[in-house]
Image: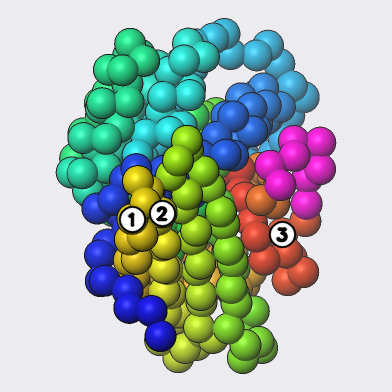
Amino acid sequence: MPRFEAIDWYDTPRWYDLVFDEGTEREADFLEAVHAAHAANSSRSGRVRAAGPRRPRPLRVLEPACGSGRLVAELARRGHRVHGFDLNERMLEFARARLAKRRLRGSLALGDMSAFTARGRFDLAHCLVSTFKYLQDERSASKHLRCVADALVPGGLYVLGLHLTDYASRSRSRERWVARDGRTRVVCNTQVEPARRSQRLEDVRTRLVVTTNGRELRSETRWSFRTYDVRELKALLSRVPALEHVATYDFTHDIDSPRALDGELLDVVLVLGRR
């Protein structure tokens, strides 16, 4: 049985980045399209009104838990004014180096998702890869949403992606990604255990196998996510009236394919508008 060293994959930003980088341009396209389609549709009354003039570029964009800065850099490259924050200094160092190498401008800072105050107000905020589920109690999750709402201009949008839980399933779920960069190959295997419903938690294990310069490195990260089904998610949103639910998509990030927020959809991308 191969041995895996216990290393937080957030402390190895280059390998983490390779796993997710393939989708960066598509996700940035989606974020721009969401703003164009929905920014004029959120209202203080919570009703959808006819689309008005689009907000001119560049957008002011906030990314909580920005990680390695792949979307910070891509949106900066497109001319947006970007600010990201994260709790992991190694990720932030990697993100700053990425911006410097590409001669891009962006603001990066150390920050906590559940307790931050943004400088200025933003047109768009986003957190696409279930990082929100690290907030393991209702108080922290609500505080995060309120912090984001406070950071948005009226009519601004928060695009939030997370995997919902099917409590009826008692099977492990698994995902596998393979990424390459020159002579480096990264294989990522993620395993999610059945949810512990009484605790609203699910245990996650990610293993990376990195082959580079003729060497093979193996690492393993374990953590727990907070769980949500559609009812629990809607209940949470109802506790933050400053944000209204504007639209729902899935992880294909297809702006032309909105979805219903119901029990059938597990990979959810919410568009929330600041009233």
Task: Please say if the residues under marks 1 and 2 sit with CB atoms less than 8 Å apart.
Answer: yes
Identify residue type, mark 2.
Thr
Identify residue type, mark 3.
Leu
**Separation (CA) of disc 3 from disc 1:** 46 Å
Question: Which color mode does the image show?
Answer: rainbow
Residue wearing tag 1: 215
* Vertical relation: 90 (above or below) 174: above
The quarter of the displayed image where residue 56 is located = top right
Task: Please say if the residues under marks 3 and 2 sit with CB atoms less than 8 Å apart.
Answer: no
Nearest the viewer among 8 and 178 is: 178
Residue 39 place in picture, x, y as percent: 62, 27
Residue 189 place in picture, x, y as percent: 51, 67
Nearest the viewer among 27 and 136 is: 27
**Separation (CA) of disc 1 from disc 2:** 6 Å
From the image, state whether disc 3 or disc 1 is nearer to you.
1
Q: Which numbered circle lies on residue 82?
A: none
Residue lying at 32% horizontally and 26% vertically, measured from the top left: 98
Residue wearing tag 3: 261
Whether residue 138 can be seen here: no
Crowding at mark 3 (Cα within 10 Å: few <14, some 14-19, many 20+): many
Residue wearing tag 2: 211
Sequence-wise first label, 3 or 1: 1
**How many discs mark residues in the rendered view?**
3
Disc 3 secondary structure class: loop
Residue 241 place in picture, x, y as percent: 49, 50
- Please provide the residue range marked out in magenta: 252-259
Crowding at mark 2 (Cα within 10 Å: few <14, some 14-19, many 20+): some
